[in-house]
C-alpha cells in the first residue's frame, strides 16, 4: 500500500469495544481483549509505515467511573500487554512512554510501565505513547498551577509566558502536536483528549468499531489525510507559494 503523506504524529481515540461486544451478546471484557489485539496490529503497521509518534487514548481519567470489575480487567489487560509485548517493542525499535495521572494506577501496573519504559529507552523508531488515566483539562490545570507556583517563587515572570512556555509544562512537552487524530466507532467528539495539542490537527472519524478496525481502515484515514491542505491560518495561495 503506497501512502504519499504519512502523519508525523498520529493520535487515536480507540472507541467502541463495549458496543462491539454488546452487538455480539458478549461481555464488554471480550471487546477490550479484542481491542488490545487490534492495537498491537495498528502499532506494528504504523511502525512499518514510518509514523514517528503514535499516541493511543488507552484509559481516560473519566474511565475510573466505570464499574470496578471492568476497570480491574482493563488494568489486568494493560499489565499483561506490557509484560508480553515489551520484548517485541525492543525488537521492533519502538520506544514506549506514558502520559497522564498514572500515579492513580495500581502499583503492579506502574511497575510494568516503568519496566517497559526502561527497556525501550534506547529505541529510536516509533515513539509509542499511551494516554493512561489521562484527561486534557486536568493536564492544562496542572500546567497552570505549576506556572503559577514558578511565578510565586520568582522563577518565571508573567510577561515571559507564551505558547512555548505553556507547552513545556504539559505532559506532552517531548512530542510534537498530532498531525492527525482518528476516532473510531462513529462518535464525533474528542472526549477531553489533547485539547491544547489538537488546535491544528486534522480530525478523522471512522464509523468502524475499534475491535473491527483493520489496516485497511488505517489506510483509508491516511488517504483522506493526503487530501487535506493544512493551512495553519494562511490562505491556499500562501501555502502554494511556500512550496513553489
Image: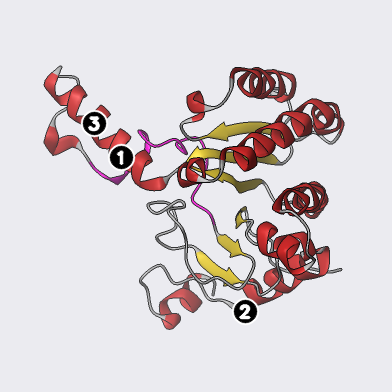
Which residue is identified by label 2?
Answer: 227
In the picture shown, does residue 26 fall above or below 96? below
> Could you tell me residue 76's position as x and y percent?
71, 32
Residue at 82% across, 69% down: 216
- Residue 73: in magenta span: no
- Residue 163: in magenta span: yes
Instruction: Check contact, mark 1 vs mark 2: CB within 8 A.
Output: no
In the picture shown, does residue 23 fall above or below 138? below
Q: Secondary structure at mark 3?
A: helix
Which residue is identified by label 1?
Answer: 166
Residue at 15% across, 17% down: 153
Residue 25: which quarter of the image? Answer: bottom right
Q: Which residues are magenta?
A: 162-178
Residue 159: which quarter of the image? Answer: top left
Residue at 59% across, 72% down: 205
Which residue is identified by label 3?
Answer: 145
Amino acid at each position: 500500500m503506497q501512502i504519499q503523506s504519512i502523519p508525523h504524529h498520529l493520535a487515536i481515540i480507540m472507541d467502541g469495544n463495549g458496543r462491539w461486544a454488546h452487538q455480539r451478546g458478549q461481555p464488554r471484557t471480550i471487546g477490550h481483549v479484542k481491542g488490545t489485539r487490534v492495537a498491537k496490529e495498528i502499532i506494528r503497521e504504523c511502525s512499518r509505515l514510518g509514523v514517528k509518534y503514535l499516541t493511543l487514548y488507552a484509559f481516560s481519567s473519566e474511565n475510573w467511573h466505570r464499574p470496578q470489575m471492568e476497570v480491574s480487567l482493563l488494568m489486568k489487560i494493560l499489565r499483561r500487554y506490557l509484560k508480553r509485548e515489551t520484548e517485541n517493542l525492543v525488537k521492533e525499535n519502538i520506544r514506549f512512554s506514558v502520559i497522564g495521572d498514572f500515579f492513580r494506577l495500581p502499583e503492579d501496573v506502574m511497575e510494568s510501565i516503568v519496566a517497559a519504559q526502561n527497556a525501550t529507552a534506547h529505541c529510536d523508531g516509533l515513539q509509542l505513547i499511551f494516554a493512561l488515566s489521562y484527561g486534557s483539562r486536568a493536564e492544562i490545570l496542572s500546567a497552570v498551577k505549576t506556572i503559577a507556583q514558578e511565578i510565586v517563587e520568582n522563577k518565571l515572570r508573567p510577561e515571559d509566558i507564551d505558547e512555548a512556555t505553556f507547552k513545556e509544562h504539559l505532559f506532552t512537552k517531548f512530542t510534537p502536536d498530532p498531525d492527525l487524530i482518528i476516532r473510531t466507532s462513529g462518535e464525533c467528539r474528542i472526549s477531553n483528549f489533547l485539547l491544547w495539542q489538537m488546535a491544528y490537527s486534522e480530525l478523522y472519524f471512522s464509523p468502524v468499531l475499534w475491535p473491527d478496525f483493520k489496516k485497511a481502515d488505517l489506510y483509508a484515514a491516511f488517504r483522506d489525510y493526503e487530501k487535506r491542505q493544512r493551512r495553519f491560518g494562511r490562505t491556499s495561495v500562501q501555502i502554494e507559494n511556500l512550496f513553489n
